[in-house]
């Protein structure tokens, strides 16, 4: 049951009558310094063309989220593992009635009819079904259609304004200066690098004829047994459906069951004919119409290695996000994990069906009833943007959502990309913040730079070396993404580690090459990302990338959760304060050889201790497990 905005509307209109809507001062809210590379303004939209405006409302108490996260995630905290419910998260961070009212009053007094205004169930967003003419007047801006070199079009503006009294209640508005709210569809990930794509996997192009399964061959072909041997993973899950692990895939990228079966057969995983558990979000479908490396590699890789490491004793969940028509963004996925999901599952369209407040008997009166789909305990994603693709406000808002997942006990794993210190598409930063192939500034990766995400880089076995020798930073086909954020300050948990690195090993690059002010540094840890044998489109294909490292680290952490859950303990949740703590120094194989070049430099060196190439190192599963079992 939904009801309309009646009560608030009359209040709002009452206010409007006494205020002159044009009299208040306006402020510039966000502005782009440059148009992203590859895009140019091509034409105006018809003034009656529809624009679905979304206002991200500011959230109270958000400045304390790091403190709250430490409280439940720091190994020395008495509250370690006492994760929050979705309801607690919503009650703490849901925008206040004052905030909602300030934005609504302004919209309604500006002539927006109540029926076109919806508040999301978590109260985080106000959606307005608008058109170009109205949106331009509401935001004092000009919309254009921008066309990418690839032919893709996007509606955006280069700056926008809000009334000064509304601005403090709004983080940002979309679509405006953000070119990246949607992950782009793509036909070929190798040759059309675009912001928001999967990082890869990359391939050598050939296929693997015969898979040599002996561990002596891991330097040329990584198999599940190689990874088990490298990281000491000898563990069979026992917690069953009490535990969960999810990988995120964005339509139209999809796995092929025939590929999963081929892999299961080759490596005798016992998973032949067993599909993963697919959770469809916003119309997500596992499409099989188009098949190619670009369509299938990421999903096939993620699912094959996640399930092989977890064994048949633990299901893998696939979050298939976005429909075929338009795809989806990270924010769509994050929305689905909180309150908007339940409306969707109920068959309603979350963008149009939910109206606030629902004052009908038994209607929704608070956030507690939403978020009924519990996110998996560990979620791995191999998709990303360049931080510079996004505005600081947009990136910060999304980062906080990852923090909320951490509060709820979810571990969020993200690959750091395969371009070393360069961004997706081998872009570097120019002094004005724009990106180009000739820039000289390092170009950090989002969401790996978000301090509430666990960022995973890539390593490899040294050429011709055995699995007993220390790995090196990946130098084969790809370089591990790593460096320093330009948006996020350094979180406490990594201060000592990063300060140590900077003190002893800061490379002598010209000022402005990377952020030396003490900002969030990444990756946090790493795992092998070279020469994976992956069944893709019916062929065993070599794959490379942090795209491989991330789901493997996620699976290893899921095994730790399994052991904890079996003992009646809570999942490990947000792991960063733990893995940087002194208890865990022996829980990683330190990587001390290899670099992540880019932007005309050698990038950073892998060094003793944490470094911006391989982080703390690769997992030492027996130690990780033992240490985590000592925690509450
Ligand atoms: C499949 O490829 C065709 C041709 O490139 C394209 O028109 C269509 O949209 C694609 N379908 C999906 C599901 O990606
Ligand atoms: C995996 O999911 C299937 C289908 O829901 C279920 O039958 C099976 O018991 C699950 N396996 C485990 C180990 O939880
Ligand atoms: C690895 O071994 C092969 C075969 O012995 C040899 O041809 C190749 O040069 C070696 N590569 C390196 C980097 O040592
Ligand atoms: C460096 O990072 C900090 C965040 O810690 C940020 O405030 C600052 O603007 C960044 N500097 C540059 C030049 O981007
Ligand atoms: C990496 O280490 C080598 C050997 O110690 C040194 O020559 C080089 O300058 C270092 N590079 C950077 C970027 O720190
Ligand atoms: C790092 O690894 C490379 C590749 O195996 C090797 O040539 C080099 O000697 C190693 N450097 C150090 C300092 O161990």
Image (cartoon, rainbow, N blue to C red):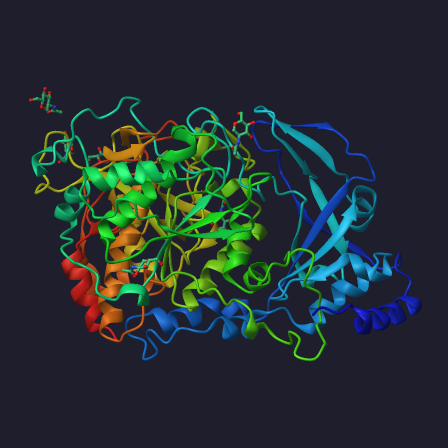
Q: Quadrant of the N terminus?
A: bottom right
Residue 298 image offset from top left, x and y in percent: 37, 38
Q: Residue at x 16, y 27 (%)?
A: 210
Q: Residue at x 62, y 66 (%)?
A: 121
- Residue 380 vertical position relative to residue 604 in the rendered view, above or below: below
Query: Which picture quadrant has residue 148?
Result: top right
Q: Nearer the viewer, residue 451 or 460?
A: 460
Q: Residue at x 37, y 43 (%)?
A: 416
User: How many marks overall?
Assistant: 0
Q: Residue at x 69, y 39 (%)?
A: 158
Taking the image in four quarters, ligand 5 sits in the one at: top left
Q: Nearer the viewer, residue 533 or 573?
A: 533
- Residue 376 vertical position relative to residue 501 in the rendered view, above or below: below
Residue 375 image offset from top left, x and y in percent: 43, 62
Is residue 615 left or right of 125 when viewed as pictured? left
Residue 417 visible somewhere in the drawing: no
């Amino acid at each position: 049951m939904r009801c309309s905005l009646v009560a608030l509307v009359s209040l709002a209109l009452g206010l409007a009558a006494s205020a002159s809507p044009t009299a208040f001062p306006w402020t510039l809210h966000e502005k782009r310094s440059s148009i992203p590379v590859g895009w140019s303004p091509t034409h105006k939209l018809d003034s009656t063309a529809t624009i679905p405006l979304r206002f991200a409302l500011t959230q109270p108490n958000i400045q304390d989220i790091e403190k709250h996260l430490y409280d439940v995630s720091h190994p020395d905290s008495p509250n370690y593992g006492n994760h929050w419910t979705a309801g607690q998260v919503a009650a703490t961070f849901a925008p206040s009635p004052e905030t909602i009212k300030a934005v609504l009053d302004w919209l309604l007094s500006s002539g927006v009819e109540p029926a076109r205004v919806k508040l999301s169930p978590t109260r985080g967003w106000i959606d307005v079904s608008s058109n170009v003419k109205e949106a331009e007047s509401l935001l004092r801006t000009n919309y254009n259609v921008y066309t990418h070199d690839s032919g893709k079009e996007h509606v955006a503006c280069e700056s926008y304004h809000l009334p000064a009294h509304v601005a403090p209640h709004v983080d940002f508005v979309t679509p405006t200066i953000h070119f990246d709210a949607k992950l782009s569809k793509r036909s070929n990930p190798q040759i059309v690098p675009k912001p928001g794509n999967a990082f890869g996997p990359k391939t050598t192009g050939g296929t693997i004829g015969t898979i040599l399964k002996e561990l002596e061959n891991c330097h040329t072909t990584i198999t599940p047994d190689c990874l088990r041997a490298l990281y000491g993973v000898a563990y069979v899950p026992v917690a069953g459906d009490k535990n969960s692990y999810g990988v995120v895939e964005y339509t139209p990228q999809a796995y092929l069951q025939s590929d999963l079966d081929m892999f299961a057969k080759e490596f005798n995983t016992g998973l032949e004919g067993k599909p993963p558990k697919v959770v469809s979000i916003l119309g997500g479908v596992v499409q099989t119409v188009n098949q190619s490396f670009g369509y299938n590699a990421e999903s096939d890789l993620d699912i094959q290695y996640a399930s092989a490491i977890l064994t048949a004793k633990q299901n893998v969940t696939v979050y298939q996000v976005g429909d075929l028509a338009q795809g989806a963004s990270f924010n769509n996925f994050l929305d689905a994990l909180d309150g908007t999901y339940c409306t969707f599952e109920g068959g309603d369209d979350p963008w149009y069906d939910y109206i606030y407040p629902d004052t009908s008997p038994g209607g929704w009166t608070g956030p507690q009833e939403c978020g009924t789909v519990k996110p998996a305990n560990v979620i791995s994603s191999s998709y990303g943007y360049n931080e510079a693709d996004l505005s600081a406000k947009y990136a910060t808002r999304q980062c906080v959502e990852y923090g909320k997942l951490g509060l709820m006990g979810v571990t969020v794993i993200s690959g750091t990309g395969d371009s070393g210190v360069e961004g997706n598409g081998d872009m570097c930063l120019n002094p004005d913040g724009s990106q180009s192939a000739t820039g000289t500034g390092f170009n950090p990766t989002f969401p790996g730079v978000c301090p509430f995400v666990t960022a995973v880089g890539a390593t490899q076995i040294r050429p011709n070396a055995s699995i007993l020798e220390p790995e090196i930073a990946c130098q084969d086909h790809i370089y591990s993404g790593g460096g320093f954020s330009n948006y996020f300050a350094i979180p406490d948990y990594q201060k000592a580690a990063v300060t140590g690195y900077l003190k002893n090993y800061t490379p002598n690059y010209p000022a402005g090459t990377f952020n030396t002010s003490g900002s969030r540094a990444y990756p946090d840890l790493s795992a092998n990302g070279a020469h994976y044998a992956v069944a893709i489109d019916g062929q065993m294909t070599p794959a490379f990338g942090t795209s491989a490292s991330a789901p493997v680290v996620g699976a290893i952490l899921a095994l730790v959760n399994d052991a904890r859950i079996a003992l009646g303990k809570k999942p490990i949740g947000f792991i960063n304060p733990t893995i940087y703590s002194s208890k865990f120094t022996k829980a990683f194989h330190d990587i001390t050889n290899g670099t992540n070049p880019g932007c005309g430099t050698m990038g950073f060196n892998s060094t003793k201790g944490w470094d911006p190439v391989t982080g703390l190192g690769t997992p030492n599963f027996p130690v990780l497990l033992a240490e985590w079992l000592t925690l509450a």
